[in-house]
Image (tube, rainbow, N blue to C red):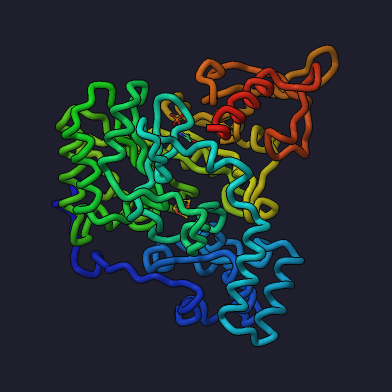
Amino acid sequence: MTYQETVWDDSHSPSLKSYTLSNFRSLPQLQNLPEQMLEEMEVVGNVLPFKANNYVVEQLIDWTNIPDDPMFVLTFPQRGMLKPEHYTQMEETLQSGADKKRVAEVANEIRLQLNPHPAGQMELNVPALRDGTKLYGMQHKYKETCLFFPSQSQTCHAYCSFCFRWPQFVGMDEMKFAMKEGEQLVQYVSEHPEITDVLFTGGDPMIMKARIFAKYADALIESKLPHLKTIRIGTKALAYWPYKFLTDKDSEEMLDVFRRITDSGLHLAIMSHFNHINELSTDAVRLATSRLRETGAQIRTQSPLLAHINDDAQMWANMWTKQVKMGCIPYYMFVVRDTGAQHYFGVPLVRAYEIFSRAYSAVSGLARTVRGPSMSATPGKVQVSGVVTLGGKRMLVMRFLQGRNPDWAHTPFLAQYDENAIWLDDLKPVEGDKFFFEDELERIKTEKMVR
Ligand SMILES: *Cc1c(COP(=O)(O)O)cnc(C)c1O
Ligand code: SF4
């Protein structure tokens, strides 16, 4: 069935309504929840910003399954997301009747301790033009792909409660990445013939109006840079607001931009973020997916593995299978990075590996395009690719999927088996006191910091 043949009356073309800290209590769906729970949401919501919308509330959350429903946990704050001491600090501040300014101060104090940008991470990845202009709206970590953060894409249709990008949502200005001009983007890519892919990211670039996105996309198309092969868009719009590609005022215009990209001979890759199979369950997402594919875009899917939301091998197997059926290509399972509510969402590496391999073994080869579990760590994207026993000793087989030095890609290395390790930093080499990449990584870091 094509989109046009589907009955699609006005009741199916809603306008976006957002629910945040200031108005969530007005939701009819929340009226039956205990007051205690709403208060907890308020305490946590003052530190970790949250935003749900009418599509998420009406079509994705199963309100008969509170508090465990994965889509509820994904979009509404839960008490456990703050460490007890932070929770108490904010609870006491609110109870003391502190004014808005004071509440914001305490919130920022706590947020800084949550350290959303591990030391040096930002400065390390900031590229510059030949004339020395620093491009704070870009990151260029892996040779062939540069990331572009348009200043208009610093928000999303709804927020994921695990997401580390909240500094840009709550106006902690010094942490913003954004950049204004597509011109600088084209200039940078033209100065770097090794770049084949430009990846639009944010927030969510699909929050942009088609007219704004078109400016950037057309600048890239018109530049006709021979080394540029692919435009990628990292987005959660299919999961959180599929109407972006169906019934919003600029839907047709956005799909036209996509067609211009593919008509120009560039590959258009939609890196679509789906955390749970429930996000694939509605008519809207099914239709939006097929309309996107009709533009010639290829949809690849990715998600972190998250406790309380998707730490379930069978769910992943079902989700990948359904994605393949919808014409999407499963791409990455990530290990959730060290950030705000890591203690709540984190899954240890060994367990992540078990979930991944169980899910991977349960699907057709067509879904085994997926790679993971993968950590986006300072030296690169590192996969836990196996557990082996050598000479009676268990160890983890690790592998680079991407390296800060491109030669590291695909290189395996061994680490001591450790059930409690949650990140690369927690792992120890099997022999010697350093992994093979550590000395060189230090050199790369020093070079970049000095410049
Ligand atoms: C993941 C990532 C990319 C893209 O990597 P692919 O493996 O090509 O998808 C690019 N830049 C950064 C910083 C990344 O984390
Ligand atoms: S949609 Fe992406 S950027 Fe936005 S809150 Fe979710 S994970 Fe973060």
Foreground residue among 236 and 58:
236
Give me the residue at 20% from left, 49% from top: 254
- Residue at 72 percent across and 79 percent down: it is 92
Residue farthest to the right?
A: 392
At 74% from the left edge and 37% from the top edge, which residue is drawn? Answer: 421
Q: Residue 197: where, in percent of width, then height?
A: 34, 30
- Residue 229 sits in quarter: top left
Front residue of this view, candidates 17 and 3: 17
The quarter holding residue 268 reads: top left
The picture places residue 412, in percent across and down from the top left corner, at: 63, 17
Residue 46 quadrant: bottom right
Q: In the rendered image of this protein, does residue 62 appear above or below residue 96?
A: above
Q: Closer to the camera, 219 or 366?
A: 219
Q: Is residue 135 visible?
A: yes
Q: Position of residue 245 (x, y in %)?
A: 25, 52
Q: Residue at x 40, y 56 (%)?
A: 154
Number of on-image labels:
0
Q: Residue furthest front?
A: 131
Residue 366: percent from the left, percent from the top?
Answer: 41, 26
Whether residue 280 is visible, yes or no, is: no
Residue 295, compared with residue 281, is above or below; it is above
Most extreme residue toward the top is: 391
